[in-house]
Image: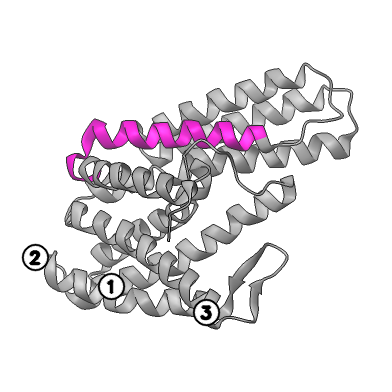
Amino acid sequence: MALSRNMVERMAVALIAIPAIVWTCYAGGWWLRSFLLLVSALSAAEFLRGTDISGYTRSIKGVMILSWVAAVAIALVHLVAGPGAALSAFMIYALATGMLLSLRSETPAKLYQLLTQLCWGVFYVSMLYPYVFLVREMDGIEGFAWLLTLLGTIWICDTVAMGFGRAFGSRKLAPSVSPNKTVVGFASGLMASIPIGYALGSWFFETESALVVTAGAFLISLFGQLGDLVESMWKRSCGLKDSSQIIPGHVGVMDRFDSLAFAAPALYFFLAVKTEFNFFG
């Protein structure tokens, strides 16, 4: 059976992108920072492109451009100075944007809706992705091995959830947000994380127990799948099927990294709490 053009494109991109991403995670440092900054910049462009600004005067485009610049700048601050400094920068952006929009002539309801959309979008693309870097550079853990666990769990659990959901799923998990996702698919993705975490904990880690890695993998699957739903909720609210078509065969950047945006912070805080309080021994 001949492969479709879309499938050929997906396979070609995967053959190039997966090794490149894994190597970037291994290299860490500015290689990983630059990659995450690029992801944030492209995601910000996709988000702003999907934001409905019909009914606003043309000058509102200046606010959108400033929001893109702010998103990239906050992500850079996060990657260089840490989440505390980035949160302060985000607060300045949110306050300044609110004051700027309050001076406009559109109805307060429309302006407040736009303000909340912009604040959520800038937070999403600038505050979440950089946690991948924080996991890689975190003291006292095997950062590269944990990033392999993060990426591997997301990729494999997503495939398992999709396969089992299509084959055996009937009850929808969130029909208004993502009609194709089922309870069976969600549960199978969670269950798949257990053998994945145990296997990775046994083979790739020198200091972490298989129990710790399995617990981390379970959290990655849980938050990754829920993060996928959040991104779907945004797309449905904008009337979009995909965030963009920038990646051949794989649609948009936000589509491909939505799970990572939520799973990476969850993993970081899990490791931080485990290290601080010496959970699991």
Q: Determine whether, in the image, residue 242 is placed left or right of residue 132.
A: right
Q: Nearer the viewer, mark 3 or mark 1?
A: 3
Q: Earlier in the sequence, mark 2 or mark 1?
A: 1
Image position, residue 72 (x, y; %): 48, 28
Q: Determine whether, in the image, residue 232 is placed left or right of residue 112.
A: left
Q: Residues within 10 Å of mark 2 (few under 14, many from 20)?
A: few
What mark, if any, has residue 38 been given in the picture? none
Residue type, mark 3 in image: Ala
Magenta span includes 28: yes
Q: Are the residues flagged by discs 2 and 3 in contact, CB closer than 8 Å? A: no
Report the magenta stretch's main SS: helix
Distance from Cα at disc 2 to Cα at disc 3 = 38 Å
Q: Are the residues flagged by discs 2 and 1 in contact, CB closer than 8 Å? A: no
Q: Determine whether, in the image, residue 74 is placed left or right of residue 233.
A: left
Q: Which residues are magenta?
A: 25-49
Residue of label 2 = 206
Q: Residues within 10 Å of mark 3 (few under 14, many from 20)?
A: few
Residue at 84% across / 26% down in the picture? Answer: 56
103 and 76: which is toward the camera: 76
What mark, if any, has residue 167 been given in the picture? 3
Q: Is there any visible trace of residue 155 in the rendered image?
A: yes
